[in-house]
Image (cartoon, rainbow, N blue to C red):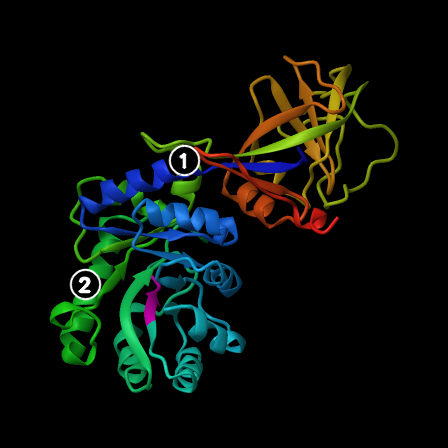
Amino acid sequence: MTAPRLEIDLDKIHHNASTLVERLGARGIAVTGITKAALGAPEIATTLIRAGVSGLGDSRIENIETMRRARIPSPMMLIRSPMPSQAERVVAQADISFNTELDVVSRLSFAAQAARRTHGIVLMVELGDLREGIMPGDLEPFVRKMLGFPNIALRGIGTNLACRSGVAPDARNMAELSALADRIDAAFGARLGAGPANRLGIVSGGNSANLAWALSGADTGRINDLRLGEAILLGCEPLHRLPIDGLHTDAITLIAEAIESKRKPSRPWGEIGQSAFGAAPAGAMKPDTGRDTDAGRSTQTIFALGRQDTDPDGLVPPAGIEILGASSDHLIVRSSRYHLSAGDEIRFQLNYSALVRAMTSPFVARVMKASSAPIREPAAALQGA
């Protein structure tokens, strides 16, 4: 079997998703399954639906189009603000898109009129993480203007935390989002047409970083949706990267193959400049201690995997193997437990950064495993070979 490859256990993903759907459902919160880290893979999308998610969300219209072509039976949300140049595609393929700009909503309105469709909008509100979002004080004027656009329906509001600045979802900012939902209901009432009793239908509190708050027993207020990707795929929460009790953390693993194993000095020699990716020169002293780093000769093994394939800083090797460094196509490790030779494979666990980049690389194959026989999806570079 080719390497590098991602081995994806669909049964474990189903367990993670269904467990979170059940736990959050008991708190009155639905789960939107996020497929962006999986590039909209139909096998994963289908697994999430079978696990009980209320809908699917992705940040790229291309991934939503992939799922539509596969006839995935689910409501679809575009969870990144649409590019104006893609307005027609967004209206054609996504039931709802997340928005923050009136000019973009206007473009969506024109596209929806041309397509004779009504397009749903969730307005994103800035609550401190300083990524996307309308400032809270500007939300009501925004809604007032937006409600004048034809073929556009306000479906809800939401926020995003912990992605850019690491701001944690907590009782304060979640209560603020609930209060904003109440204010929109009170101000616009029957003009919303978004849910029962003229209330916003969706109040989306955030992503996997919200789990600690949502499952703490705190008052969840109006929050009735979370957008979960990392917690389902990797079984951990993003704030501290800690495993979530009862979830699998090895549903997706990355396998690499060795191409060289030789004894070499531990320090480079010759005049030292920057590495290929601009890292600080590798010197003889550790900058934090000033101690000599020369450990003598040791066996280093090179794997056919690099920064073009994944984020090496996000890889967790097996016990007894240490990652020494990486370039675009090479990953160098040292083993204190195993004798590694060319052709040997080792299995890495991944964090979210490593997973996203590995899924995106055309050189990394994907093998879907379920209770039935594995489904192999070759690397794009090998297709048609």
| Residue at the left extreme of this rendering | 197
Q: Which residues are magenta?
A: 121-126
Quick check: 42 above or below 200? above
- Indicate yes or no whether the magenta region holds residue 122: yes
Secondary structure of the residue carrying tag 1 is helix
Using the rendered view, name the quadrant where residue 306 is placed.
top right
Give the amino acid type for the residue marked by disc 2 in the picture: Ala
Say if the magenta span includes residue 340. Answer: no
Tag 2 residue: 179
The amino acid on which the numbered mark 1 sits, given as a three-letter code, is: Asp
Residue at (39% x, 33% y) in the render: 242
Nearer-the-camera pick, 150 or 102: 150
- The spot of residue 317 in percent (x, y) is 58, 26
How far across and how far down the image is residue 325, in percent?
A: 69, 32
User: Between tags 1 and 2, which lies in front?
Assistant: 1
Q: Which mark is residue 11?
A: 1
- Horizontally, residue 377 falls left or right of residue 331, namely left
* Residue 65 visible here: yes
293 above or below 216? above
Q: Nearer the viewer, residue 198 or 21?
A: 21
Q: Nearer the viewer, residue 132 or 92?
A: 92
The answer to which of marks 1 and 2 sits earlier in the sequence is 1
Specify the farthest residue to the right: 270
